[in-house]
Structure formats: structure tokens, C-alpha cells
Image (spheres, rainbow, N blue to C red):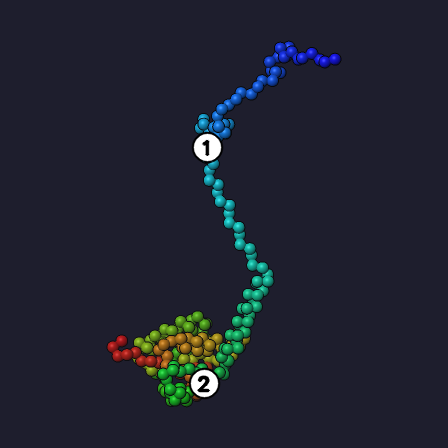
Amino acid sequence: MIPDAIDASRYPARMRKVPPEIDDRDDASLFRNAIGADAGKVRPLREATPPPATPKPKPSAKMARRDEDDARSEFRRMRLSALEADDALTYRRDDITPRVLKKLACGEYAAQEELDLHGLPLASAEALLREFLRDCRRHGLGCVRIIHGKGRNSEDRLPVLKNMVDGLLRQRADVLAFHSPPSAQGGGGAVLVLLEKPASGS
């Protein structure tokens, strides 16, 4: 038996199927309407604060060990090249003859002034030596003696002041030559220095 057709009028309106209204607006208009853009309800988002930078990774133990090993190697090289307590200081500029250096080593040049650094802290000794050499040049002195000691009581028994004096004198353009004097004039605990005299009028 075929059922009778449903009489839609018997049901409330809310239960009836209502055909959708046809909206002829384009998709962009529909989207703006849906989000409330046309009514001014949409506001631009604030610019987001950039995330904090990723912290740099801490050096690994392997890298730290390598740096430490490099530092130890450098220290060993410095020790191998460092002057010992009884080593003679010796240096001459290229324009100074070996004969002049030999005379200096034999103590044949008389020191006009003397500076005693023996027992001073390294930083104080270096500052005092620089000031002393400036004064010597200002007064036109040609030969001076610097007492640095042999450093037998220094840490690792390395003559710290002796090595500082050697390095500083080699860096100065006004130092013509230097050499440790004979024992009677200080031997390995001192050095005689020949200085370039300033040009007249300077």
C-alpha cells in the first residue's frame, strides 16, 4: 500500500524545510560581512613582540679542554724561550757593528746612570724602566746600567724582571745595543745599554 503524500500544512512552520535565500553578493563581500569588517568591528592585530634570541650554547667541555691545552703549550714555549738566571742579555741594531757589542760586553763603556729594579713587582719595575729611559734620552745619556737581578727566588725560578727588561729594550727604537756586563759590574744580574742620543735641537 502506498502511503499518502505528507501534508506539509499539518506541521508547524518551524519544522518545514525552507529553501535557502539566494545571495548574489560575491565571496569577498560575504566574508567581510561574516567577520564584521563592513561594520568596523575588525581591528588589525598588534605587532607581535619578536621572540627572545636563542642563547648561545655554552662551550663544551671538549672545547674548554682544548683551550686549556693550547694555553699550557704556549706557556711551555714561553718557558723554553725564556732567559735563565745566568743567561747573558745581548742585542744590537743592524747598524751597530759587532765590535761595539763586544766592547759593551767587556764593560769598556762607562755607565752614566744606573737604575736598580731588583726586588720590585713586575708592573712597577716596567713603569719605572720606561720613565728612566725617557729621562736618559731627555738628558742625552749614551750608556746606562740597569740592575734586574737573576730572579733565583722567582716562581718557577724564572727571572721575570730580566725577561721583561730584555723584551722592553728590544722594542725601543732609541736602544742601539745592550749586553750583560762582566761579573764585576753585575754580570747576569744587570745589563749595560747604549742609547741613541737625540739630534741636536730636538
Looking at the picture, does residue 5 appear above or below residue 49?
Answer: above
- Label number found at residue 9: none
* Left or right: 195 in relation to 18: left
x and y percentages locating residue 35 in the rendered image:
50, 29
Give the residue at x 51% y 47%: 52
Residue at (50% x, 81% y) in the render: 85
Residue 23 seen from this side: yes
Mark 2 packing: few (<14 Cα in 10 Å), some, or many (20+)? many
Which residue bears the numbered disc 2? 187
Disc 1 versus disc 2: nearer the observer: 1
- Viewer-side residue, 169 vs 126: 169
In the rendered structure, which amino acid carries the disc numbered 2?
A: Gly
Q: What residue type is labelled 1?
A: Arg
Q: Residue at x 48, y 75 (%)?
A: 160
- Looking at the picture, how far across and down is residue 162, in whole percent? 46, 78
Quadrant of the image containing the N terminus: top right
Residue 101 in the image: x percent, y percent?
40, 86
Residue 43 numbered mark, or none: 1
Q: How many labels does the image show?
A: 2
Task: Please identify the residue farthest to the right as the structure is shown.
Answer: 1
| Residue 55 x %, y % | 53, 52
Q: Could you say whether the residue bearing mark 2 is in a helix, strand or loop?
A: helix
Residue 155 vs residue 105: left or right?
right
* Residue nearer the viewer, 173 or 5: 5
- State which quadrant residue 10 falls in: top right
Q: Can residue 194 be seen in this view?
A: no
